[in-house]
Amino acid sequence: MIKRAKLSIAAIAAVALAIPINAAQSPSLQSIYGTWQNEAKTGWIKISDCENRTPCGKMTRVSLKPGVSKLDIHNPNSSLRKRPLVGIRLLWGFQRDRNRWTSGKIYNPQNGKTYRATLEAIGNGKLKVRGCVGPFCRSQIWTRAQ
């Protein structure tokens, strides 16, 4: 009887210890914090905590063709059109929803528009970034910067 109890406790402990290991390896639960390169490989975005344990993303580097402006020239606010792209906030306002971040905003400096956004770590150093306007959405896969 005592051997059975010890065996049951050992089995329960093994299962309990296995759950966090599997959860940590799940791509959907991976941290999205860090620096990411956009799909076009023209921008590097650092995602960090916004003070309230939600992600914010700022442009840390741009790599554009010569002659292409590195200023926020498409911003709808004319007083912001001369600010450099490096340092601007591109992502904010997210809420955790199971395996992803939802209800956020993403600013697109290529057209000066802001969209609803979701973020989801999909494994192998990839981040799915989805922007929506109304029912129409577009996704990009960002890669963790080395």
Image: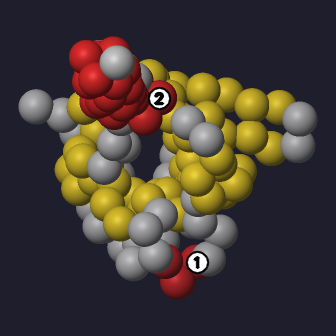
Is 104 placed left or right of 64 in the picture? Answer: right
Work out which residue is located at the far bottom of the displayed protein and give it. Answer: 79
Which secondary structure, mark 1? helix
Q: Residue at x 24, y 47 (%)?
A: 34
Kindly indicate the quadrant of the structure image that contains residue 133. Answer: top right
Q: Is residue 99 above or below residue 93?
A: above
Q: Nearer the viewer, residue 11 or 105?
A: 11
- The residue labelled by disc 2 is 28
Kindly indicate the quadrant of the structure image that contains residue 35. Answer: top left
Which secondary structure, mark 2? helix
Q: Nearer the viewer, residue 10 or 59?
A: 10
* Nearest to N terminus: mark 1 or mark 2: 2
Work out whether residue 59 can be spotted: no
- The residue labelled by disc 1 is 78
Amino acid type of the residue that numbered disc 2 sits on in the rendered structure: Ser
Q: Position of residue 132 (x, y in %)?
A: 74, 40
Q: Nearer the viewer, residue 140 or 109?
A: 140
Amino acid type of the residue that numbered disc 1 sits on in the rendered structure: Ser
Q: Position of residue 78 (x, y in %)?
A: 58, 78
Q: Is residue 86 above or below residue 35?
A: below
Q: Residue at x 58, y 59 (%)?
A: 94
